[in-house]
Amino acid sequence: MHELSIVTHVAKTLDELAEENHLTKIGSVTLEIGEVSGIITDYFIDCWDYFKVRHPLLKEAELKLETLPAVTWGEDCKQEYETVRYGRICPYCQSEHTFLLTGNECTIKEIEAE
Ligand SMILES: [Zn+2]
């Protein structure tokens, strides 16, 4: 139920935004989803559809998803590489001293409101 809890979290953030800015309706929401965030986009969309009909603010909101590529940083050789392709081991120096720079997030990039 990872996806549903994220949808709930996003909706809560949008509620707060709407209240602050006196919005009554949200037209579309663009979310950036990291490549290795573990979020299954089809399932995420199902959750969103389930959720939005119960949520007046989001009733007509269109969900747009953008994938954010995962990038890992190799600490020993100070180079970036594609996480999905090489995993945790740096392809340049075979070091395990690496960490994820981007790709694990789910953030609200843009909303269109009325
Ligand atoms: Zn390296």
Image (cartoon, rainbow, N blue to C red):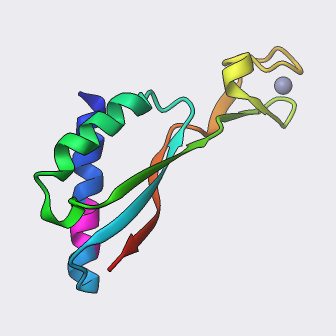
User: Residue 105: x and y, percent?
Assistant: 49, 43
Q: In the rendered picture of this protein, how many numbered marks are placed on residues?
A: 0
Instruction: Tell which residue pokes out farthest to the bottom in this image.
Output: 22
Is 88 on the left-hand or right-hand side of 6? right
Residue 48 found in image quarter: top left
Q: Residue lying farthest left? A: 54
Q: Is residue 60 magenta?
A: no
| Residue at (20, 59) in percent of width and height | 59
Q: Main secondary structure of the magenta part?
A: helix
Query: Residue 83's image quarter?
Result: top right
Q: Which of the pair 100/104 is nearer the observer?
A: 104
Q: Is residue 96 left or right of residue 36?
A: right
State which quarter of the image contains the N terminus: top left
Seen at 57% across and 33% down, the residue is 35
Of 74 and 61, nearer the camera is 61
Q: Which residues are magenta?
A: 13-17
Quarter the C terminus occupies: bottom left
Residue 14 located within the stretch drawn in magenta = yes
In the shown orientation, is residue 10 left or right of residue 52?
right
Which quadrant does ligand 1 occupy?
top right
Is residue 96 visible in the rendered image? The answer is no
Image coordinates of residue 40 in percent, x first then y, are 41, 28
* Residue at image point 78% right, 17% down: 95
Q: Residue 31 at x, y = what percent?
A: 46, 52
Q: Report whether residue 29 is seen.
A: yes
Which residue does the image show at 58% across and 38% down from the upper left?
103
Residue 26 horizontal side relative to residue 108, left or right: left
